[in-house]
Amino acid sequence: MYTQLLFFTLASFCLFTLSRIALMLWQHQRVRAVTGWRPLLLGGVRIDAHLIAAFTALPWLFAPWLDDVTFVHHLLAVYLSAVWGLFVLLEVSTPQFIIEYDTRPNRLYVDYLKHPREVFGMLWKGYKFVIFSGVFLLTLSTAAVFVYLSTHTQSLFTANWVVAIVTSILSALVLFGIIRGTLRHRPINPSTVAFCGDAMVNTLALNGLYSVLYAIYCIKNERSAEQSYGTMPVEKMLHLIGKSAKIDINQDLRLPTLHHQSPTHAVNKPKNIVLIVEESLGAQYVGNLQGAGLTPYLDQLSAEAWNFTRAYATGTRSVRGLEAISAGFPPTISDAAVRLSGAQSRFFTLAQLLNQQGYTSRFIYGGESHFDNMKSFFLGNGFTELHDQPTFQNPAFTGTWGVSDEDMFNKLHDLLSNRKDTDAPTLSLAFSVSNHSPWEYPEGRIDPIGEPASVENTVRYADWALGQFFAKARHSDYWDDTLFLVVADHDARVGGKSLIPVRHFHIPALILGGGIAPRRDDRIISQIDLPVTLLSLAGIHAAHPMIGHDLTQAESGGRAMMQYGDNYGYLKNDLLTVLEPLREPSQWRYTAPENYEPCAINADIVEESLAHALWPHWAYQQGAHSLPHLLKNNRLTPATPVTDSPAHATS
């Protein structure tokens, strides 16, 4: 078994490495543009080792006990040859898949198998040479590997049971480390080896089978809103979405919500845009929002800013807030787009849009950016710079989740300060990390009250760090040329007996900077309204697919959407509509903070709520949250007309 496993491991590494080098040579212009040879080869070794170890883990563990059993040798030869065949099949499929979809084989590779007649008919008519070449290589290499594995079965290991136990334990430890792939908080994933803004180049660090298996694994996150909440014809859904968003539905139904936004503000010079996302900072902690009064610095800022007193998060996870703030994407019962395999490229973000306006886009995070797939999502969707924990030199404090908020803000300040007048304007997404269990922060910044390691004290530290940043920003050269959004991703400790605990979706949100007049705004707003509003304030003329409101328009606002586990909440003025899986909708008159009065069903609002619950999942599946230049020669062009695919699941 050891002879077979060692040969298989070495051969697999050679296969993947040679295939990767061939792909890199083929795509040398794009690889060279991001200086990608070294990270691709090193990242590839990590991914390959992970996959090979996962497929050979059990044989390695049993080898000390069964190495001299002939029957096991033959069985292992068959198994390893079959795995080898899978390895080769995906590698020989990769070049044609890249030609068609500009990425390695992914979920589409499996989806096409649901339609074998059409797909194999297409392949036979258009790709005979590719098919014959692939089958020849697959057959020849698999047969050669099987012959070798079947004939080279000499036992290399003879030991008593004590040595066998020790060897198995050591093997288990080594295999666990290789499969996990990292000593960081989260196991290895595609985001771990992503390093540039070219999504296709990032996939070259993967291998074909890993890419497909990871995409299949992620399908579990793509729950169907139709199956949970009910059905609605696509035309009606789009009509209701357009009416609520105050936009005309595009005639090109590949991008139905694509519309031109004319700003209400004119600027003489392009504005920097800074999105500061505060971890777990619910309104329950914020003094000016009738909270516990733990945020004196934020309260002071709110008096100098456009302060939204009734802003609501779209969910209870950071990735949910990040998708809303950076991409204007509403919540759905599926996982957040940041974590979905189909949104890792060609998915709309502010960076995708502003890059076309001459901006440079950066993501700044004090933790490990491969957590929750953030690195892959942001680099694959327009962000050209990544500043995460490994890039911080001599941080003031490093905790479980990364460097402290003050370190993150120092990095942000340095990046903004180093911009010259001739440099491009910048979009900066700065995500804080300190306000997270186990509640760690540097000493000497605040005077702790009670137990130092508590959410209350960490909120106070996060507020202190925010205040220190703005004290410097106000006196910096970039202040007059920059728009700052300060907003929470979600509340902490979300819970309660209500179907949608609305008070725990209430978050601070304010816009300030050069030219922003102080203002208290009591309209109900959603996180998805904020990026649209920033474009208007920055004087950006552009077309985009976001359905949020431009809050500079007096008639906008007045509604928010919230995903709480399986339940979907749609708050319009004081009417809360709750959609639950496989149950009839319910409606309540909501009065902050926690008063819910049952009321008669308003059918029109129920339909509006259902449209908003269905839209994000449909848009993700259709690739409709994108931009026109991203549609060329890729999967986003629907195979069938959108009008022929109503949301037809049963409730």
Image (tube, rainbow, N blue to C red):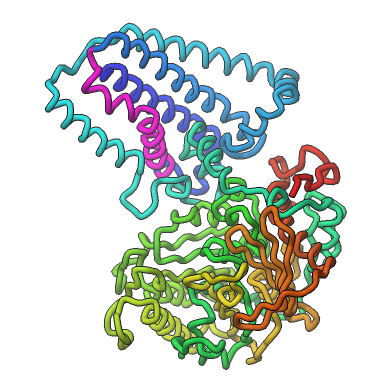
Residue visible at 71% across and 83% down?
523
Q: Which of 611 and 416 is in front in this view?
A: 611
Q: Is residue 650 above or below residue 550?
A: above
Tell me which corner region of the image, top left, top right, bottom left or bottom right, holds residue 359: bottom right
Residue range highlighted in magenta:
39-68
Asked whether residue 548 is in view, the answer is no
Q: Which of 7 and 437 is in front in this view?
A: 437
Q: Is residue 378 above or below residue 597?
A: above
Q: Is residue 567 above or below residue 80?
A: below
Asked whether residue 407 is in view, the answer is yes
Position in image of residue 387 (x %, y %): 44, 63
Position in image of residue 241 (x %, y %): 80, 62
Residue visible at 80% across and 81% down?
555
Residue 65 drawn in magenta: yes
Position in image of residue 476 (x %, y %): 48, 85
Q: Is residue 197 above or below residue 104?
A: below
Residue visible at 47% across and 66% down?
364
Residue visible at 61% across and 48% down?
222
Q: Is residue 397 left or right of residue 250?
A: left
Q: Is the magenta stretch mostly helix, strand or loop?
A: helix
Position in image of residue 65 (x %, y %): 22, 21
Residue 188 drawn in magenta: no
Q: In this view, does 72 lie to the left or right of 435?
A: left
